[in-house]
Image (cartoon, rainbow, N blue to C red):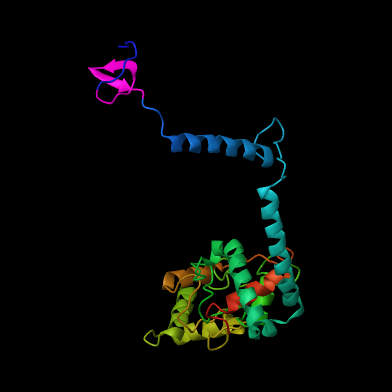
Amino acid sequence: MSKENETDEISGTETTGHEWDGIKELDTPLPRWWLWTWLVSIIWAIGYWIVMPSWPLITDYTKGMLGYSQRDVVMAQVNDAKEARKIYSEKLLDADLETIKNSPDLLEFALVGGRSSFKDNCVACHGTGAAGSKGYPNLNDDDWIWGGSLDEIHHTLNVGIRGVHEDTQISDMPAFLSDEILNKKEIEEVATYILSLSDSSISASRDAMVSYQENCAACHGPDGKGDKMMGAPNLADAIWLYGSDKQTIINTISYSRAGVMPSWAGRLDEATIKALAVYVHTLGGGE
């Protein structure tokens, strides 16, 4: 309900003419400080529209008198970071792996870059903590199929394993059952003998030992400790890539394994591969 404006008897302030349930609305003036703040905000906004990029157009936007661009600022910062990184990347290229490892500045740069590259390229198989999983090696332990020295890790990163690189590392283990080299009984006996290499409580027959020596020792060694030059795993320790239970070992002997690691040469630049090799080597299991 609206009525003619009148002056409130108690406050002496004119009303707006509106009344709700007997309550009249006072036409109280806005505080002066609020009005000044409002006016200053308007002036500031107009000034911002003039000097800064602010108004969108159909295919562009107003650049403002200052021509400021946050994109340009960010790109300048990125370029500065690239230049700083380029200096150390060139140092990595010129230095051998041992020099990088023994130089505090180069080592710090390599570890930062290597950790970043590992997250981008390696965690899908080896995990965020490099602990690996079934079929993917743990890079934190001391068991290295192709060797865990700085140079060996660097080489493996470059050429890969069973990859497309012309020098890729290949170890071809026969599928003893599929290739009809051994029968199921002989394979089970060999599996038992292999388990006995790392567990003295397991006894194996002489026939099993003879079968191992005739079919497996050429790669894995007569004592089962493997050969890193051939990519033959150590069978005499407690570290297993696909599992240490007897059935898994039987399956490996019967049908072989053929895990693949890509070659990073050509995918990553040499400085990044060096940084990655140094990082992996320092995870705890590098030889």
* Residues rendered magenta in the picture: 10-27
Name the side, left or right, on which 208 lies relative to 144.
Answer: left
The reply to whether residue 16 is in sight is: yes
The reply to whether residue 164 is in sight is: no
Q: Quadrant of the N terminus?
A: top left
Along the line of sight, the residue nearer the viewer: 133 or 97:
97
Quarter holding residue 114: bottom right
Q: Is residue 38 above or below residue 162?
A: above
| Residue 18 lies within the magenta run | yes
Along the line of sight, the residue nearer the viewer: 156 or 140:
140
Along the line of sight, the residue nearer the viewer: 140 or 279:
279
Place of residue 71 in the rendered image (x, y in percent of width and height, measured from the top left): 68, 49
Residue drawn at point x = 46 percent, y = 71 percent? 243
Residue drawn at point x = 63 percent, y = 72 percent? 276
Residue drawn at point x = 46 percent, y = 87 percent? 206
Quarter holding residue 283: bottom right
Q: Quadrant of the C terminus?
A: bottom right
Q: Is residue 214 above or below residue 270?
A: below
